[in-house]
Amino acid sequence: MTPTLVEHRITVPVDHDDPTGPTLEVFAREVTADDGAHRPWLVYLQGGPGHESPRPTLGPLAPGWLERALVDFRVLLLDQRGTGLSTPYGTGTRPEPLDAAAEAAYLRHFRADAIVRDAECLRAHLGVDRWSVLGQSFGGFCVLHYRSRFPDSLRETLVTGGLPPVGRPPSEVYAATHAALRRLEAAHLRRHPEDADRLARVLDLAAAGGLRRGDGSALTPRLVRTIGNQLGLHGGADALHHLLERDPRSPAFVPDLEALLPFGGRNPLYAVVHESCYADGGTTDWAAERTLPDADHLTGEHVFGWHFEDDPALVPYAATARLLATHPWPRLYDADALASVDLPGAAAVYVGDPFVEQRFSEETLALLPGVQGWVTDAYLHNGLRVDGARILDRLVALARGTA
């Protein structure tokens, strides 16, 4: 099967409540099977925040869920604002000299609420009455806001590893995800007890300034500990183990370690706006840092204020990140509205997920009439990437009552 690809570009306001103000471009790629031009639409909302939509590469590198989706849908792959072929954010696109206050004001419009409004503009542009949406991880946050704000635009909603808490402060979220990662770290060391001494050796070397990037900057011990994010991903524990079995003085060690870090200069948007995605009202105030029980364990998808000190590629974003950490965010979800919307859907909740807390996802699931839950320990957070066809097939069946 060779699908048809059509590119869509639209111009939208940075602030949808100020349609006469500054604008940016949003890109989306339509993917349609040979015989699928009349099938209903499915919009894919990517994880992140700050990640572009996957590319429809053909063959074994194609997202497994995409081929399955094309059986029932024509698919729209949305590059969320600031990512991919939408107007980018980061080095080269920032004004000089930088006005951190102006940049923080700009990035206040990069959360789920603005992304959903962008999707609504695309829906109007394409002349679509109602469509289905699939959200992975942060994409699920966007889906929940969509249900809360524009339910009449939706046929059904599908979520994998991404039902966010409603009304809980970020401090509770990050305390729970720290605890989940501790459990995964303990399980990893039961499987590979030798990794404890190996990690200690790496941390000692980092503390002595012995782990140097290509630009000469040092990898600090607290940056090294963030490789714990791999424990929540399929294949991640093996990647961590194989890193630690290597001699840390080898020339390949630092590049391999860098590849496992969650945040960095290649995608600064991911780091700068990350905590704000969990702010269902109130400020974040470096919630992950405030709730870290101690500094002697691995950390995961937790952005800390010191990221913008220890990583040279993130240092230029420090002032902007500090302003966003103190910004009072509006609510993203209306619990009463969600409970009043009897809209078909299905959501996969992953047991022990250190990225999106299972207990809070199940609380949210209980708010959603019409949404069938699938709580499973068969997958980690990136299950859609590794077994996407099977996961999407089950979600569609659950949403339509044929499972």
Image (spheres, rainbow, N blue to C red):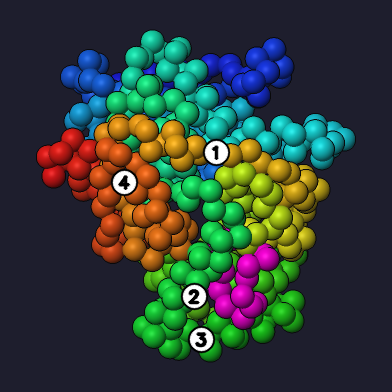
- Which mark, residue 347? 4
The front one of 387 and 375 is: 375
Q: Nearer the viewer, mark 4 or mark 2?
A: 4
- Mainly helix, strand or loop, the magenta region? loop
- Going 39% across and 85% down the picture, which residue do you hit? 190
The magenta region covers 289-302
Whole-angstrom CA distance, mark 1 to mark 2, is 29 Å
Q: Tell me which numbered mark, 3 or 1, is placed earlier along the sequence.
A: 3
Up the image or down, 218 lies above or below 205; here it is above
Provide the residue designation for mark 3. 196
Provide the residue designation for mark 2. 182
Whole-angstrom CA distance, mark 4 to mark 2, is 25 Å
Q: Nearer the viewer, mark 3 or mark 1?
A: 1
Whole-angstrom CA distance, mark 3 to mark 1, is 41 Å
- Going 25% across and 45% down the picture, which residue do you hit? 372
Q: Is residue 331 magenta?
A: no
Residue 220 in which image quadrant? bottom right
Q: Nearer the viewer, mark 1 or mark 4?
A: 1
Q: Given the image, on which type of amino acid does mark 1 rest? A: Leu
Number of marks: 4
Up the image or down, 137 lies above or below 184; here it is above
Q: Secondary structure at mark 3?
A: helix
Disc 3 crowd rating (10 Å Cα; few below 14, some 14-19, many 20+) is few
Q: Are marks 1 and 2 in contact (CB under 8 Å)?
A: no
Q: Is residue 290 magenta?
A: yes
Provide the residue designation for mark 1. 332
Residue 53 seen: no
